[in-house]
Image (spheres, coloured by chain):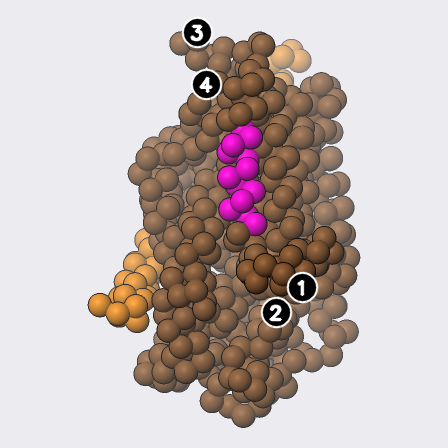
Amino acid sequence: MLNVESNFTWLDWGIVAGYLSVTVVIGIYVNRFIGNMADYVVAGRSLGTFIGVATMTGTELGLVTVMYAAQKGFTGGFAAFHIGLAAGVVSLIVGLTGFIVVPLRRMKVMTIPEFYGKRFGNGVRVYGALLLAGAGILNMGMFLKAGAIFVTALTGLNDPFYVQVVMTVLIVLVLVYTILGGMVSVVITDYLQFIVLSFGMLLACFFAVRNLGWDSITKTVSTVHGQAGFSPLDSEGFGPSYIVWMLFVAGLVSCAVWQTAVMRSCAAENEQVVRRLYIWSSIGFLVRFLLPQFLGICALAYFWHTSEGRAVLFTSEGLPIDDAELTMSALPLFLSQVLPAGLIGVIGAGMLAAFMSTHDSYLLCWASVLVEDVAGPLSKGRLSTAARLMLARVFIFLIGLFLLVWSLWYPLGQDLWDYMAVTGAIYFIGATALLVFGIYWKRASRAGAYLALTSGLLAVLGLDPIKNAVGLDRLEKSLGFNLSEAHIGLFATAAAIVLMVVGSLLLPDRCPSDMSKQESTT
Amino acid sequence: MTWLDFWTVLLVLTLGLFAVLAVVVAIGGFFDIRRMLRTLAKNGEKTQTDTTSRKA
């Protein structure tokens, strides 16, 4: 890693420690409000609009989001802004139309597999839940690594031993307050994190522009990336297929299919709140990419003009280095240089709280899916509330343990955002087909659902180690064509849609689902 | 309009909108949390009363 002196002082450590202690105390305090599983998972369905926006943005604008978005800004320049634009516009459309999320809220489901159960039967529910939890847990597998890189770079703690200690302390804190407080503690800590991080990020942008100057930023992007640093359509950079993939992944999936976002709409007070939540959150969905990407661009401009930064973070041809861990460290290193002592502590605390907030939401989400949609249906409803709560807490602990091992073992060979899009696609490709066709097409059948869910597994071919293992890299060379994760993801999505339609037409359901029965009686 | 102009306008607009959103949500969210905790506390009392009356 780049060896530079950080502005992080003992005052900043004090701010971080104080902030993290307050969040844990809140988690312990709100435990008294948890009466049943609905309180624990969806906060008793009592979220208002503002706190809904705060918690949705708080969860999605986490440390990991900031890290992968900044990395995209560093490696892609201004053209990376198209990802945020896609996210904001699609989220606004979802809010205005209520597409997918309003029917889900109307059905009062707590998880997406619960919808599968109501629409396609218990078998699809359990299969879909296993895919969802598996993909989701794999998806957050790099979170600890991203957190470790952030802490090391921001604080100047270069000894790997200290990093491991800090990360272990963080995961223990997250486990404690998620296990105790469930969604209520998640909501309150998300709110605090929203405030700290929103103002912190805005201030960071101000300091970055003041330090570098707007002209220097744009000129550096032009020098390093050329036209591809501005035009997302340029095939030297992102290209049209990547834009379509982002409209789907960062747009529709992020806000209407990804379980952690859908949980917020399921926790909303009513359907009007769901719509308002998405309309307001469209700004959050835009911001969560755009602001960190801009800071990543600023990091590019900063290190391009320092001799050591240019030697470590760029190739001899002047391109960003093809090393995911190094390019990810650019943002925290940059912040450690330009932010003053005190503010750096506030940003650090906000980021670490964001890290915890994302962890707690995801841990809670995947654990509740495993309890409600796998253990629940398999036990045929014999699990008591106390047993379900206990099981959820055990799953949270086990997932936490897995994350520690996976983040140390897996070699990240691509941009973090692309790793996350591919691992998430294992679930969301099938899920999108099931949600869209299950809600809006009466003839969608169980057989079509199984086929669509299974086709999502094709997405793993987008992971670099798997791609190389099955020989797709050799195929690329022989064809002279770059088969990117976007191509593979779009192909798998098309396969899921075709299989859903063909499977449903050829193998229709013999007995109607719960949802169809309800429709015929109303 | 060049791509740079477009991204500049988008960035400035986003920063402005987000600053407003942050203030509105910070204030509105505080009242939402208060209401949520009251609702949850009420639900808890109701569940306790139901359980007690069923036992009686």
Q: Chain of mark 2?
A: A
Residue carrying label 2: A324
Cα distance, mark 2 to mark 4?
A: 45 Å
**Would you place residue A487 above or below residue B39 in this image?**
below
Magenta stretch, residue numbers: A488-500
Whether residue B5 is visible: yes
- Nearer the N terminus, badge 3 or badge 4? 4
Q: In this orientation, which residue lies closer to the viewer: A423 or A198?
A: A423
- Nearer the N terminus, badge 3 or badge 2? 2
Can you tell which quarter of the image residue A31 is in? top right
Residue A96 image offset from top left, x and y in percent: 31, 38
**Would you place residue A284 above or below residue A426 in this image?**
below
**Residue mark closest to the camera, 3 vs 4:** 4
Q: Chain of mark 4?
A: A
Q: Secondary structure at mark 2?
A: helix
The colour applied to the residues of chain A in this rendering is: brown
Callouts 1 and 3 in the same chain? yes
The colour applied to the residues of chain B in this rendering is: orange
Say which residue appears at 52% left-offset and 19% top-offset: A505
Callouts 3 and 2 in the same chain? yes
Q: Are marks 2 and 4 in contact (CB under 8 Å)?
A: no
Residue A195 within the magenta-colored segment of the rendering: no
Q: Secondary structure at mark 1?
A: loop
Residue carrying label 4: A442
Q: Are marks 3 and 2 in contact (CB under 8 Å)?
A: no
Q: Are marks 2 and 1 in contact (CB under 8 Å)?
A: yes
Say which residue appears at 70% left-offset and 67% top-offset: A166
Q: Which mark is residue A521?
A: 3
Residue A199 image offset from top left, x and y in percent: 40, 65
What type is the residue that disc 3 sits on?
A: Thr
